[in-house]
Amino acid sequence: MPNEAVVQETDGSVWQTKHVYAMAGLCLIVGLAIGYLFRGSQSSPLPLPTQSESSSQPAAIPNAMGGHMPTIEQMKQMADKKAAPLLEKLKSDPYNSDLLIEVGKIYNSTHQFKEAAGYYDKALQVTPNNVAIRTEMASCLYYSGDVDGAISQLQQSLRYDPKDANSLFNLGMVRWQGKKDSQGALAAWQELLKSNPQLSADRKATVEKLMADVQMGTKN
C-alpha cells in the first residue's frame, strides 16, 4: 500500500500556474510545502531532495499544462525581480514583518527555500508567536535539507500553540520522512487527533490512513 501525504496547494503564483506534483528529485514544483492539513490535497509522499539534486541546474522541462517549467535558476531570477520592490521598501522599514513574510513567500513559491527561510526568520524575530509562518519556515528548512532545523521550528511552534494541527501534522511528516522515526511520527499524529477533536471526518481519515501506513511499515 503506498504512503500518502497532504501537500499545500497554492494558486496565483508569479506565473499564474497551479501545480501539486510529487517531489521528483529536482525540486521544480511551484507552490510546494510539506503538508497543511487544513489547506491541502492528497498526493504522493515527498522525499527530501539530496544536496546534489537541490543544487543542480537542469534545462527547462515540459509541464502537464503545456509549455515548459522554468529552471531553478530562471525561477530565482523571476523571484528576485518580483521581490525587488518589497526589498526596496524594507531598506527604510527593515522590521516590517508583513513585508518580510511577503518576500519569504515569493522565494518559497519559487523553491528558493534557503532564501525564504531567511526572510521568515527575520519576520519571526519581530513576531515570534506567528505559528503559521514558523511552520512555513520549517517546511523551507526541510526542503533545503535541514531536517533537524525543521523539527526544532515545529517544536517551537508547538510551544506557542500545543494544539496547532498543522505543526503536529508536519512534525509527524518530518519525523517519518526525514528521520525515519516511525514512533515519533505516530506520537505527533496521536497528539493531533487527541487535541483536535473538531477535525472533519476526511481530515481525520487522512491522519489515520498515514498512521496505518506507518504501523504497517514497522511490521514489515
Image (tube, rainbow, N blue to C red):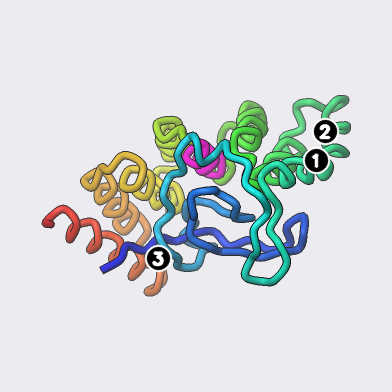
Residue at 29% in and 48% down = 185
Residue 27 lies, in percent from the top left, at 55, 49
* Residue 198, label in figure: 3
Residue at 25% in and 42% down = 181
Q: Are marks 3 and 2 in contact (CB under 8 Å)?
A: no
Above or below, 100 against 78 in this view is above
* Residue 83, label in figure: 1
Main SS class of the magenta portion in the image = helix
Res 130 visible? no
Residue 117 lies, in percent from the top left, at 60, 34
Mark 2: few/some/many CA within 10 Å (<14, 14-19, 20+): some
Mark 3: few/some/many CA within 10 Å (<14, 14-19, 20+): few
The kind of residue tagged 2 is: Leu
The kind of residue tagged 1 is: Ala
Mark 1: few/some/many CA within 10 Å (<14, 14-19, 20+): some
Seen in the image, is 16 located left or right of residue 10?
A: right
Q: Disc 1 on helix, strand or loop?
A: helix
Give the alpha-carbon distance from disc 2 to disc 1, as whole Å. Answer: 6 Å
Q: Residue furthest front?
A: 59
Res 92 visible? yes
Q: Point out the tag, 3 or 1, that comes first from the N-terminus.
A: 1
What stretch of residues is rendered in magenta?
A: 135-144
Above or below, 215 against 178 in this view is below
Seen in the image, is 152 located left or right of residue 94?
A: left
Residue 165 lies, in percent from the top left, at 43, 53
Q: Point out the tag, 3 or 2, that comes first from the N-terminus.
A: 2
